[in-house]
């Protein structure tokens, strides 16, 4: 995350947070590269065939946005992208940090619910 930029005036995700989140999510550095732990890891993007269909939600101002967009493109290339929605004018965590409006958050949650319902009704 150190090399990732944000267009937010006061970004939620700070560069130093990357190391903290990585250590908490996957303490063993080699595990972070495992396809099951991180399908969007650099080399894992080369082999996404057969991955479950996905809804990708990114935020316009999020430091992690470009990573999510790249993942959406890779999923689309193998026919596994159901939808990519970019939340305009918002940063990471807008839904819990009160950056977005309640209506906007509910709209995104409705998309997630619809995606799960559709995926589980087959």
Image: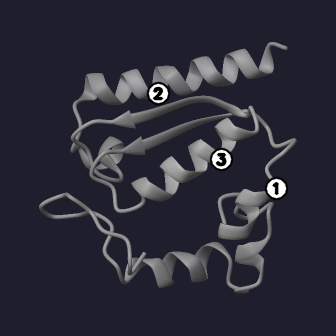
Depth check, front residue: 66 or 87:
66
For marks 1 and 3 on the same chain, the one whose residue lies earlier in the sequence: 1
Which residue has dot 1 on it? 47
Residue 46 in the image: state x and y as whole percent.
Answer: 76, 59
**Can you say whether 100 is above or below 17 in the image?**
above
Q: Position of residue 52 (x, y in %)?
A: 79, 38
67 or 108, which is in the foreground?
Answer: 67
Q: Residue at x 80, y 13 (%)?
A: 121
Crowdedness near tag 3: few (<14), some (14–19) or many (≥20) residues, C-alpha within 10 Å: many
Q: Quadrant of the C terminus?
A: top right
Q: Residue at x 43, y 75 (%)?
A: 1
Of 58 and 21, nearer the camera is 58
Side of 63 relative to 36 (left or right): left
Looking at marks 2 and 1 on the same chain, the residue that comes earlier in the sequence is marked by 1
Q: How many marks?
A: 3
User: Which residue is painted at 69% across and 39% down in the image?
Assistant: 77
Vertical placement of residue 59 versus 22, above or below: above
Secondary structure of residue under mark 3: helix
State the SS at label 2: helix
- In the rendered structure, the answer to whether residue 94 lies left or right of residue 112 reads left
Nearer-N-terminus badge (2/3): 3
Report the residue at 33% width, 55% height from top: 62
Cα–Cα gap, marks 2 and 1: 29 Å
How would you rate the neighbour count of disc 1 (Cα within 10 Å): few for under 14, some for 14-19, many for 20 or more? few
Q: What residue did someone put label 2 on?
A: 109
The answer to which image quadrant residue 101 occupies is top left
Residues tagged 1 and 3 counted as in contact (Cβ below 8 A): no
Check the image and report above or below for 83 versus 71.
above
Q: Quadrant of residue 45?
A: bottom right
Q: Which residue carries the number 3 mark?
A: 74
Q: Are marks 2 and 1 in contact (CB under 8 Å)?
A: no
C-alpha span from label 2 to label 3: 23 Å
């Amino acid at each position: 995350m150190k090399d990732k930029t944000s267009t937010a005036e006061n970004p939620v995700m700070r560069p130093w947070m990357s190391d903290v989140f990585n250590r908490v999510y996957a303490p063993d550095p080699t595990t972070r590269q495992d396809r099951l732990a991180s399908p969007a890891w650099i080399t894992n993007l080369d082999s996404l065939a057969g991955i479950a269909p996905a809804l990708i939600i990114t935020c316009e101002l999020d430091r992690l946005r470009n990573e999510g967009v790249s993942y959406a493109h890779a999923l689309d290339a193998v026919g596994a992208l159901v939808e990519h929605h970019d939340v305009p004018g918002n940063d990471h965590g807008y839904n819990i940090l009160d950056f977005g409006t309640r209506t906007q958050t509910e709209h995104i949650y409705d998309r997630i619910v619809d995606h799960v319902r559709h995926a589980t009704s087959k």
